[in-house]
Structures are given as structure tokens and as C-alpha cells.
Amino acid sequence: MPSRGDAAAAAAERNGPAVEVGSLVRYRSEEDEDDEVVTVVRPDEADPFRRRISVESPLARALLGRRPGERTTAFTPGGRRYLLVLAVQDRSR
């Protein structure tokens, strides 16, 4: 579970950009409390070893449109994952 400080920091950024194709996203998985960073890309640009995930993936579908401070659920082949979006950076500009 995220600490109050993490939640407050994420809430302060709620008006930040929404996740879209090209976004660099930092999120926390609530199951293991690990922060992860991925870039959402077109399917032909996906490279999981470089943390570039296809917009068609379950994780990207769950993150799309979300803003910092928002929670979402990803239904992945490994099961349900509860996520907190921490930061979104538009990499296409």
C-alpha cells in the first residue's frame, strides 16, 4: 500500500498529462509496492526488454487516459494488478 506521502505527491500532480501513445509512465503496483517505468508505444515499436510496451497490451490499456494520482486495474495473463499512476511525461514532444 502506498504511503500517505506517496499518495499526496501523486494527488498534487493530478492535473498532469494523461497517458497516451508516446508517454513515459511511472506507476506503482500495489501488490508488491514496486515502482516501474514504461513507455507506451505503437505495436511495431514494442520492446519489453527496453520497457517499451504496446498500446494493445493489457497494462497499456489500463494506463491509457490515466493521470498522476489515479488508480487503475490491469487484467494481465498473470492476473489482476492494481496500479497507481505516479508520473506521466509526454515523450512525443
Image (cartoon, rainbow, N blue to C red):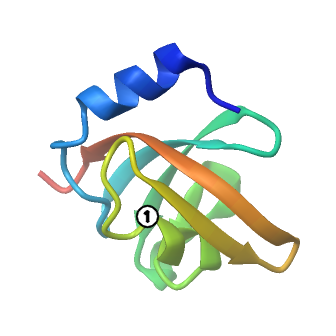
**Crowd rating for badge 1 (residues with CA inside 10 Å; few <14, some 14–19, many 20+):** many
Outermost residue, front side: 4
Q: Residue 50 vs residue 43: left or right?
A: right
Residue ID at (47%, 73%)? 45
Where 20 falls versus 7 (above or below)? below
Percent coordinates x, y for residue 16 in the rendering: 18, 43
Where 90 falls versus 41 (above or below)? above
Residue ID at (71%, 33%)? 1
Secondary element at image label 1: strand
Outermost residue, top side: 5
- Location of residue 23 by image quarter: bottom left
Percent coordinates x, y for residue 4 in the rendering: 53, 19
Q: Amino acid at mark 1?
A: Val
Residue ID at (31%, 61%)? 22
Residue ID at (60%, 52%)? 83
Percent coordinates x, y for residue 10 in the rendering: 38, 31
The residue identified by callout 1 is: 40
- Location of residue 35 by image quarter: top right
Q: Nearer the viewer, residue 60 or 4?
A: 4
Q: Residue 1 vs residue 23: left or right?
A: right
Q: Residue 4 vs residue 28: left or right?
A: left
